[in-house]
Amino acid sequence: MQIIQRSQDLHALVGDLLGQRRRIALVPTMGNLHAGHHSLVALARAQADVVVASVFVNPTQFGPNEDFARYPRTPQADVAGLEASGCDVLFMPPVEDVYPYGIERSVRVSVPELPEVLEGVIRPGHFDGVATVVAKLFNLVRPHLAVFGQKDYQQLLVIRRMTRDLGYPIEILAAPIVREPNGLAMSSRNQYLSADERVRVGIIHLTLLWMAAQTQSKGASRADIEEEALARLRDAGLVPDYAVLRRADDLLEPAEGERHQVALIAARLGATRLIDNFLLDL
């Protein structure tokens, strides 16, 4: 696996690969990788000749009260895991390479509407940071496809919208959520949980499954389902930000009889905030 730290070197390598008509897949990450990330690389590996992964903790997607400084950095383990997963090229740039004019003076990419609900309300500016850094990576890597995890569902929709609106000729693939035995979605933030807390937060996945079952049975209103879901999370000692049913394509409130929906939960246990979702096809 080749490790590159400078954009100009990556750009040159990609030019050679495209000249050889190699099909390139991009897997953007913020590092501290686990089996969920490795599954993204495996999906990319099956779809492309060359897999390029990035490890970059992007400062512009963290709010002023969020955990940018605390976010775990594990570069040696990330290199070993990516190499074992079949990654060909790892891009690990410093902040000044990605934002050459400084963070405050950088060009920003902003996707309208989608970032104005759910995570966007709780984390204002977050999706502008995501869209900006992904656009930069798309310009550098020029991939034929890019793989994103379904766990960050709203992010996935934002990236799809940006890709189509800006005319990137890139296929966006959604990788299924990888879960721990109790259903907990794998996340870099799971390591902040104690063994007891890991058991307790299994209620998130159980609540999503309950919401899906209730929606499919059509025995309760959406408002009742969401209210009971919040109560279940609170009874388990979690502090939920939301537990909602939304349209799967744009996260608006679903109309009566809407078939494609998604159940989404964000909740905190202590200082750890977790998100998860479950797709419904009614």
Image: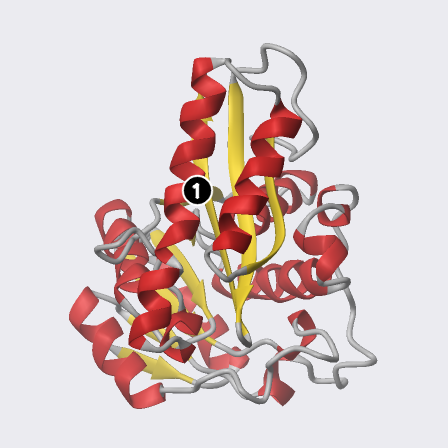
Q: Residues within 10 Å of mark 1 (few under 14, many from 20)?
A: many
- The residue depicted at 59 percent of the width and 10 percent of the height is 257
Residue at the extreme top of the image, as rendered? 257
- The residue depicted at 70 percent of the width and 84 percent of the height is 100
Q: Which residue is nearer to you in this view: 6 or 271? A: 271
Q: 165 left or right of 76?
A: right
- All told, the count of numbered labels is 1
In the rendered image, which residue does mark 1 sit on?
Answer: 207
Quadrant where the N terminus sits is bottom left
Q: Is residue 191 above or below residue 53?
A: below
- The residue depicted at 22 percent of the width and 47 percent of the height is 46
Q: Which residue is nearer to you in this view: 139 or 279? A: 279
Q: Position of residue 104 (x, y in %)?
A: 81, 81
SS assignment at label 1: helix
Residue at the extreme front of the image, as rendered? 235
Q: Position of residue 247 (x, y in %)?
A: 61, 28
Quadrant where the C terminus sits is top left
Residue 146 visible in the snapshot: no
Q: Position of residue 234 (x, y in %)?
A: 55, 54
Quadrant assignment, res 135: bottom right
Quadrant assignment, res 127: bottom right
Q: Amino acid at mark 1?
A: Thr
Q: Which residue is nearer to you in this view: 241 or 172? A: 241
